[in-house]
Image: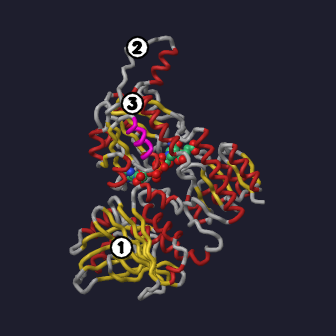
Amino acid sequence: MPRVLIADKLSPAAVDIFKNRGVDFDIKTGLAKDELIAVIGDYDGIAIRSGAKLDKDVIAAATNLKVIARAGIGVDNVDIPAATAKGVVVMNTPFGNSITTAEHAIAMMFALARQIPAADASTQQGKWEKNRFMGVELYAKTLGLIGAGNIGGIVADRANGLKMKVIAYDPFLSPERAIEMGVEKVELEDLLARADVITLHTPLTDKTRNILSAENLAKTKKGVLIVNCARGGLVDETALRELLDNGHVAGAGFDVFVTEPAKENPLFGSDKVVATPHLGASTNEAQENVALQVAEQVSDFLLTGAVTNALNSPSITAEEAPKLKPFVALAEKIGAFAGQMVDFGINSIDIAYEGQVAQLNVKPMTSAALAGVLRPMLAEINMVSAPAVAKDRGIVVSESRQDDSPIYDSLMRVTITTEKGVRAFAGTVIGGAPRIVEVKGMELDAAFAPAMLYVNNLDKPGFIGALGTILAEAGVNIATFNLGRVAAEEDAIALVGVDQAPADTVLAQIQALPHVKEARALTF
Ligand SMILES: NC(=O)c1ccc[n+]([C@@H]2O[C@H](COP(=O)([O-])OP(=O)(O)OC[C@H]3O[C@@H](n4cnc5c(N)ncnc54)[C@H](O)[C@@H]3O)[C@@H](O)[C@H]2O)c1
Ligand SMILES: O=C(O)CC[C@@H](O)C(=O)O
């Protein structure tokens, strides 16, 4: 019988499911790292929330572990690359706590607008300070959302109900979806200048870390209220404290902090701050949703091999697995290639299947391609959530099949239409491994490498030498080099597998070479 460790407090709904499904389990919450390391080798699965930290040392000790399941969305507490390298599937439960978290953000907004916590403390001390607590009305005020995904979308809906004007900064929000959500899509600068209340709803990524930096906070309106129920690290806490103290920012509602558990924090001690200990998802309803989902997913996986909501593994059934596996991997890779090549709101994604692959069940491949396309924007997306996320964002997804494939036994083409144009990428499977065979209509044949450099240039003598020199001088070793072109002296591409991802400064040097139109670093 498989054994599962429940390592954070989960709703009893999870326990009932493990019992009914015949999965053995232990509940050991609040374990320190060394305690977790000592016991984790006994388990096939582990169910967690945000408390248990599954870093590379813990995962290294997990000799029998097959699945890590997060009852919630963010998996910041799991070292996914380490789990992947060890062949451990990491699952989450998207959507289950979105409403609850959106409600927490709205609650924070009201708490700040009417200074409810400070007024409560004062009143219960018998002070009756009626003149001290002058609030602001939210009606007709501008709410600026940074991140307009599931939770941002629900916050927008509730704020529209409050008759607020909602504006949103989310580079990956399509204009159609913005209209559907009843929000005005704006640039970050515009949002900072216009919002009376700013709420954050993005994951913490390299692009969103400190999105409200000291510089950006200084661009906000005097009297702004700031709410963060997403992730610590999106806001510069020290800079925010200074602006609270000098009166520029009128209030800050924080559920998440750079360091958690937050015992000390720059924001603590200000009566303009409302702080909660990462309670965004803490309602009975949300915890029951995510616990039910987690227990079902873990039981299914350990008892039948079915993979659901996996962040590091495609979701396919045991029977289909052998045939689909290489094509699912190809779809994810071409999708990831395409997703890293677009910077604008996506209107549509078409996946065309040609030749033998068109005879297979293409749904998992389409889901994998969508997950690949969307992953640069939504770190925690997976094959199961990708189609729903694409739909929610108003992205039109289409599939087509054609029995013939003129050159390859099988060909898969991903075409993305954005506000700015159309880009297409095609690949095939050779010897069980995915290869990219067409970019911008140009044929080439390249294996995917963990780090790649894409350059689009005019095919002129001297370009390859100059590119090689820049990479050599930057200490970037070339592993593979593939070229494609329309014709001599015309449009051309170079796809270079590199042993180290080139730095932005190196990319800028390449971009500045004569005849170069575009240079990008890609990761797979
Ligand atoms: N406080 C809590 O207890 C709690 C509970 C649930 C979720 N969360 C966190 O809330 C966050 C949002 O969750 P969600 O379910 O809405 O996720 P989501 O994936 O549905 O939405 C995230 C949105 O952020 C946008 N985004 C990505 N990069 C961006 C950038 N650079 N600038 C602006 N927008 C960007 C994406 O396009 C997407 O629309 C996650 O970090 C999640 O972990 C916190
Ligand atoms: O489990 C929790 O309490 C927090 C969950 C939340 O941060 C999430 O990302 O889903």
Judged by depth in the image, the label closer to the viewer, 1 or 3, is 1
**Which disc is residue 424 wearing?**
1
Considering every residue shown, the one lying at the far bottom of the view is 407
The part of the image, by quadrant, that contains residue 42 is bottom right
Asked if the residues shown at circle 2 and circle 1 are in contact, with their CB atoms under 8 angstroms apart, the answer is: no
**Ligand 2 shows up in which quadrant of the image?**
top right
Q: CA distance from mark 1 to mark 3?
A: 47 Å
Question: Is ligand 1 less than 8 Å from the beta carbon at label 3?
Answer: no
Identified by mark 1, the residue type is Ala
Q: Earlier in the sequence, mark 2 or mark 1?
A: 2
Query: Is 147 on the left-hand or right-hand side of 257?
Result: left
Q: CA distance from mark 3 to mark 2?
A: 19 Å
- Dominant SS of magenta comes to helix
SS for dot 3:
strand
> Residue 362, image x and y in percent?
52, 73
Above/below status of 189 relative to 162: below
Identified by mark 3, the residue type is Gly
Residue drawn 77% across and 56% down? Answer: 22
Residue drawn 54% across and 81% down? Answer: 432
**Which disc is residue 251 wearing?**
3
Identified by mark 2, the residue type is Lys
> Residue 509, image x and y in percent?
27, 67
Q: Is residue 156 magenta?
A: yes
- Give the extent of the magenta segment: 153-161
Q: Which residue is labeled 2 in the image?
A: 130
Question: Which one is nearer the viewer's eye here, 462 or 228?
Answer: 228
Asked if the residues shown at circle 1 and circle 3 are in contact, with their CB atoms under 8 angstroms apart, the answer is: no
The part of the image, by quadrant, that contains residue 226 is top left
